[in-house]
Image (cartoon, grey):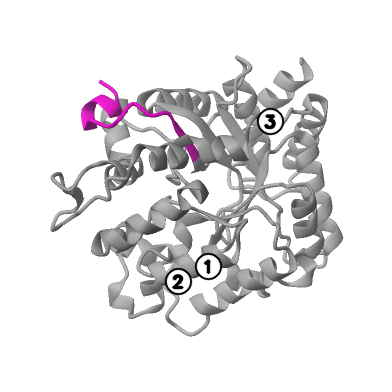
Amino acid sequence: MNNVQINGYRSLPLCDIHTHLHKEPLNASLSAFRALMDYYGYAAINLACVHRMGTDDMDTANILKGLYLKARLNEDGETHAIVYGNATHFYDERDTAENYLAQVKTQYAMGVDGFKILDGKPKNRKHLGHPLCDPVFDKMYAFFEENGIPVLMHLGDPPHFWGDKSGMSAYGLAHGWWCGDGTFPSLEELREEIEGILTKFPKLKLCLAHFYFLGHDPAGARAFMEKWENVSLDLAPGGIMFEGFAAQPDVWKRFFADFSHRIFFGTDNTNVISGDPAEYFERSWAPVNLVRRMLEWDETKQVPYSAAKTLTPLHLPREQLDNIFEKNFRRLHPAARPLDAQLIARYASALSKQLQAGNVSDDDPALEIENLAVIEKYFAAL
């Protein structure tokens, strides 16, 4: 049985705007995504590829791997996968407006479909050391705006991350997500930086991940969406947003009725499968179930949330679900951008040589050299 059959969902195609690619052999990643898409009834996914997931984790070949997977998943000529690229920070004199612009232009020429910015996560923003609306990014944002290139940005974290440390989970503490020691920019300051970006680039196609952490603030969410007509939100959990939806269901139903054409299905899931696939899908890709249950189920069936809590679902109408699950994705990406096979092959070859010489930092250079060999061979033959 697949996920739809097990959970009694409507038979609706899903397009996920927010997945990631973790370090695995490329063939294992390809098999994982094919199995996951089949099990969940996915029509398309966005591989949001970033070179640096945190302040230390380096995945130098992430975007090239994403482009390979896009090519393989789209071999039938349909758009089952798109890829978002990401500009790398060097945290030295190389971080110039010209360098950021050159990076995104090169990736766009290769065939990425948009860009993912993770610098708005408080830990990353603290390490960056200057605002996201700093002029050093203006040429990059202008390029995005002028070419209608979509941007998916993580901005902020749940508000309680700035509160008492005792309110944090062990997982959050282990990953350095607590922001309450006075050394992090506040959530309000981070949102002011978004306002700064949009004031300069109001036509930027900006999607804010995790619902911009506004799940407990419907008035604030409405004011923001009404002010910036080109901005959208994704529903990738943290689950705390769904607690907010369940606390004021009538208010949020009106919000979804007004803005379902600017809200995207997303999960933040990855290409990693361990153990029995069927059991793993229901356990570790649980964000799919959390989002679908909250949006689809009616009030007679409460959504499991934790050992001690259930949530009342919103039971949205079919038209709104169609927008969120598929149509918004297809409007933004009617077709995957073409890939420049020879350019990708050249970059894969050059990066492999840099890794072999020890000139580039990576958490697992041996694995990436193997992956890059697969990428170079595939694209050189096209």
Contact between labelled residues 1 and 2, with CB atoms less than 8 Å apart: yes
Q: Quadrant of the C terminus?
A: top right
Q: Which amino acid, by three-letter code, is at mark 2?
A: Gly
Specify which label sits upstream in the sequence, 2 or 3: 2
Residue 375 lies left or right of residue 238; in this view the side is right
Identified at 59% across, 76% down, the residue is 192
The single residue placed furthest to the bottom in the displayed view is: 182
- The secondary element bearing badge 2 is classed as helix
Q: Residue 77 in magenta?
A: no
Q: Which residues are magenta?
A: 1-16
Q: Could you tell me the amino acid type at mark 3?
A: Leu
* View extreme (right): residue: 98
In the depicted structure, whether residue 72 falls above or below residue 207: above
Q: Which residue is mark 2?
A: 220
Disc assigned to residue 372 = 3
Image spot of residue 298 (x, y percent): 20, 44
Residue type at mark 1? Phe
Is 223 situated left or right of 150 in this image?
A: left
Find the distance from the CA under tag 2 to the CA under tag 3.
Answer: 45 Å
Relative depth, front residue between 21 and 23: 21
User: Is residue 335 or residue 63 the one in the foreground?
Assistant: 335
The residue labelled by disc 1 is: 224
